[in-house]
Image: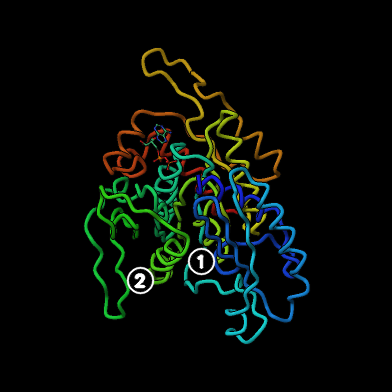
Amino acid sequence: MDNQIKSKIIEILENYLNPISKKPFMLGEEINLVIKNGHANLSININPDDISKYEKVKEELENKISSVENVLSANVVLTAERKAAEKGNQDPRNNKYELEVKNIIAIASGKGGVGKSTVAVNTAIALSALGKSVVLLDADIYGPSIPKMMGISGKPISNKEKKFVPLENYGIKCMSIGFLLPTDTPTIWRGPMIMKALEQLFISVEWGSPDYMIVDLPPGTGDTQITMAQKVPLKGAIIVSTPQDIALIDARKGINMFNKVNVPVIGIIENMSYFICDKCNQRHEIFSYGGAKNEAKKLDTEFLGEVPLDKNLRISSDEGKPIGIFNQNSDIAKKYIEIANKIINI
Ligand code: ADP
């Protein structure tokens, strides 16, 4: 129940502007949120000079949070520790990781199971086929599937500077939380742990200076996305959706979230767009068709392409043998080359 309360409160914060930065409030650096048995405690890190400007915020947020279903009490406190320690007026949002990667692109989706990781892998393979140097970072801490899809297992070793050496296959260096955690044991992730894990994946890895880093995000709009927006110098996010309304509703939420945190949505991909029967050659639009393209038009963002539902793509992904390497002449591999070309030209 506390988790439901947390999502509702995050929604409230996303729709509430910090009176100083004029941007929505962010969990992590700026806001700490603890919910226990229906009691919500939120602390806002502020500069002590601004205290008068936050009094109203405190009251309004307490009222809004109190009215969330199942909340028994809401307490908002203003703290000034970190700002005071920082001795300056730096906006913590500006302290991004320093990486030598030319273009960092996050692959996101509103829902799980729409093919986000499959798109991340195949886009990386296609960019590499077009001569770009590419690395792949699996930030899907809840269900890391990049190791399997890239046919990589094992544990990365550390170099002299105590940085992980990413594992490589098909010319693409990969790092995944999946390399560092036991496979079948669930990990319960809390906000600060997510930030630490992401920090490790981004800055404690010998990434070199590739043209592209493709980041596979967890589905939805949680702490990982917020940390990414705060900490990673992203070129933008690509949203993957299946065509039906129910998936698009969540994709739209993802797009709105990226807009709010000032991460450009550089395009939308429709996955499982249609199915061509291998027996009768007839086209079936199992999950409807064209929804993502319409959405891209409405939101004035690029439609990067549609990928059909395809048994061979599923098999090759599950076997860790990307279709762009093992069947370069397939329609699917060609679709991904078109997508990669569009990404290069953005
Ligand atoms: P997500 O990252 O969104 O949870 P995955 O990429 O892990 O989704 O894909 C979920 C499953 O669907 C995997 O078994 C994958 O092989 C399969 N899949 C993804 N895209 C397609 C497609 N276009 N055609 C057939 N199977 C697909």
Q: Which mark is residue 102?
A: 1
**Residue 245 in the image: x percent, y percent?**
60, 29
Q: Residue at x 64, y 79 (%)?
A: 90
Q: What element does badge 1 sit on? A: loop
Q: Which mark is residue 198?
A: none
Q: Quadrant of ligand 1?
A: top left
Amino acid type shown at disc 1: Lys
Question: In the picture shown, does residue 97 fall above or below 190?
Answer: below
Q: Earlier in the sequence, mark 1 or mark 2?
A: 1
Question: In the picture shown, does residue 321 fall above or below 32?
Answer: above
In front here: 306 or 82? 82
In this rendering, does residue 342 appear at all? no
Count up the numbered dots. 2
**Residue 186 in the image: x percent, y percent?**
31, 49
State which quarter of the image contains the C terminus. bottom right
Q: Residue at x 38, y 34 (%)?
A: 330
Camera-nearest label, 1 or 2:
2
**Residue 179 in the image: x percent, y percent?**
28, 57
In front here: 49 or 253? 49
In the picture of the structure, the residue carrying the numbered disc 2 is 206
Question: In the picture shown, does residue 304 fall above or below 224?
Answer: above
Residue neighbourhood size for the residue with mark 2, other residues' Cα within 10 Å, grouped as few (<14), some (14–19), many (≥20): some
What's the image's color scheme?
Answer: rainbow
Does any atom of ligand 1 lie closer than 8 Å to the CB of label 2?
Answer: no
Amino acid type shown at disc 2: Glu
